[in-house]
Image (tube, rainbow, N blue to C red):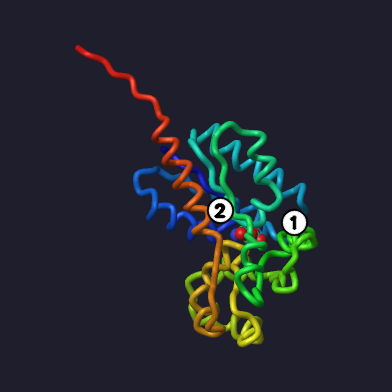
Amino acid sequence: MKIGLFDSGVGGIKVLESLRQHFSCCDYVYLFDKNGLPYGNKSVLEIRNRAINACDFLIREKHVDAIVIACNTASCVALSECRKRYKIPIYGLIPPLKKLSLKYNKVLVLTTELTHNILLKTIKGLHNSKNLVLTPQKNLAIYIEKYATNKFMLKKYVEENLAKYKGIVDCVFLGCTHYYFIKNELKEILGCDIVDGRNALINKMQREIFNFIKNSHTDFYYL
Ligand code: DGL
C-alpha cells in the first residue's frame, strides 16, 4: 500500500515518521507544498485549492492508495471537500477540542491563524469552551521552517512567547504539525502535558487499514 502525504513544509515530516513506525509495510510519497508556505496566513479558498492540487498530484502522478493531509490548517479547511472528491481514503488532523476541554482544566491550543478562525466557530457550541485558550501563532510555522534543527532558537521562541503560560495551563495542544518541533522545549519549560493529533490519526488508520487488508482480494491459480 502506498500512502501520500503533504504539508506546506517540514511539519508533516513528523507525521511521516510516526506513520513509518506504525505502518512499516507501507510505501510513502511526501509532497512539500513549498510555494504555499505559510498555509496559515492564506484564505480558505486558496488552501482548499492547494489541497486539491496536492491530492491530484499524489493520485494521478504518484498513484497513491491513501492520502494523509499532514497539516492541521489544510485538514480544517479541505478534508471534507477532498473526501467527497476522491475515491481513495483520505485522513487528516483535526483538533479534538471537545475531548480536550473535558479532560483538562485549561488547554493552550496553538494553531495557525487560519485554523484559529475555523476553531473559533467550532468552540461556540462546546459546553466546556472556557477550558480552552485558543492562541494563534502568526509566524511560528515559518520560524520553525527556518530553525527546525536549531534547538537554541526553538527554545528561545518558547521562552519569549509561551513561557508565560507556565502554571496557568495543564495541557498544550499542538494544532499545527510544524509545532511538533517545539514539543520537547514546551515540555521542559511549561512542564505540563503536550498533546498532538498523531495518536488519534494512527488509531483511525490502524482500524481502517486493517479492514483494507482484511477485505483485500486474492486470486489463486494452479499450474
Ligand atoms: N503544518 C501546517 C499545519 O499543521 C501548516 C503551517 C503553515 O504553513 O502555516 O497547520
Which numbered disc, 1 or 2, marks the residue closer to the eye?
2
Return the residue at label 1. Answer: 42
- Residue at screen point 29% across, 18% down: 220
Q: Where is residue 89 in the image (x, y as percent from the top left)?
A: 54, 38
Q: Is mark 1 on a helix, strand or loop?
A: loop
Q: Where is residue 168 in the image (x, y as percent from the top left)?
A: 65, 85
- Three-letter code for the amino acid on which mark 1 is drawn: Lys
Ligand 1 - quadrant of the structure image: bottom right
Quarter of the N terminus within the rendering: top left
Q: Distance between the residues labelled 1 and 2?
A: 17 Å
Marks 1 & 2, CB-CB < 8 Å contact:
no
- Residue at screen point 73% across, 63% down: 116
Q: Is residue 16 above or below residue 162?
A: above
User: Number of marks in the image?
Assistant: 2
Return the residue at label 2. Answer: 70
Q: Position of residue 130 (x, y in %)?
A: 75, 73
- Residue at screen point 47% across, 71% down: 149
Q: What element carries label 2?
A: loop
Q: Is mark 2 within 8 Å of ligand 1?
A: yes
